[in-house]
Image (cartoon, helix red, strand yellow):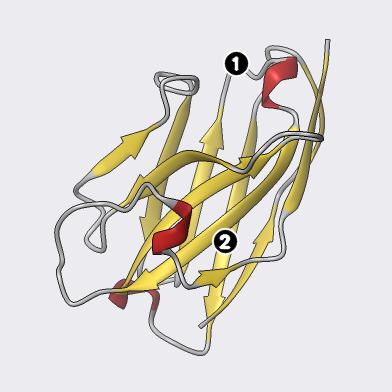
Amino acid sequence: VQLQASGGGLVQAGGSLRLSCAASGRTLSMYFTGWFRQAPGKEREFVAAISRSGVSTRYADSVMGRFTISRDNTKNTVYLQMDSLNAEDTAVYYCAADRRISTSGVLTNAQEYDYWGQGTQVTVSS
């Protein structure tokens, strides 16, 4: 599966952005998906993950209550709605996918994902 992330940009603190991750080559409904981010000089960190069905989600503590992950399997796309952004959210955001037989649960470890998008830059000005 090929993943294409988009929707990043420059936004003021307190603003919102919606990232999209479009999949091609395979049906995304067969894949667990997640979002990670990497700020300059820092390790890549988990942001959010969603199960194949979309029923289960998981968030990093730092984004809980502000970010929402969702998926539309009919459009082969996963979204990350980001609200109340702050300067600490500035990073390159990556979507990731991994094909699993199980339909339940989520993956929060980057090493569990086999497929990655190219990343989209999010910059929050304070």
The circle drawn on residue 43 is: none
Q: Which residue does the image show at 26% across and 51% down from the upper left?
A: 106
Q: Nearer the N terminus, badge 2 or badge 1?
A: 2
Judged left or right of residue 87, residue 50 is left
Against 63, residue 77 (above or below) is below
Query: Most extreme residue toward the bottom, as rendered?
Result: 25
Amino acid beneath label 2? Cys
Looking at the image, residue 32 sits to the left or right of residue 97; the answer is left
Instruction: Residue 122 in the image: state x and y as whole percent.
Output: 76, 37
- The kind of secondary structure element at disc 2 is strand
Q: Position of residue 59 (x, y in %)?
A: 38, 32
Give the SS element for disc 1. Answer: loop
Q: Which residue bears the numbered disc 1?
A: 84
Left or right: 106, with 115 as reference point: left
* Residue 117: % across, % down: 63, 66
Which sits in the foreground, 74 or 38? 38
Q: Is residue 18 left or right of residue 70?
A: right
**Residue 72 falls in image quadrant:** bottom left
**What residue is pinned by disc 2?**
21
The answer for how far apart the CA atoms under marks 2 and 1 are is 21 Å
Which quarter of the figure has residue 95? bottom right
Above or below, comparing residue 49 to residue 85 in the picture: below
Asked which quadrant contains residue 101, the reply is bottom left
User: In the rendering, at what x and y percent does residue 35 appear?
Assistant: 51, 48
Numbered label tally: 2
User: What amino acid does circle 1 point to?
Assistant: Ser
Label 1 CA crowd tier, 10 Å (few <14, some 14–19, many 20+): some
Image quarter where the C terminus lies is top right
Residue drawn at 47 percent across, 54 percent down: 110
Which residue is pictured at 14% across the width and 69% down the height? 102
User: Height in image: 101 above or below 83?
Assistant: below
Q: Residues within 10 Å of mark 2 (few under 14, many from 20)?
A: many
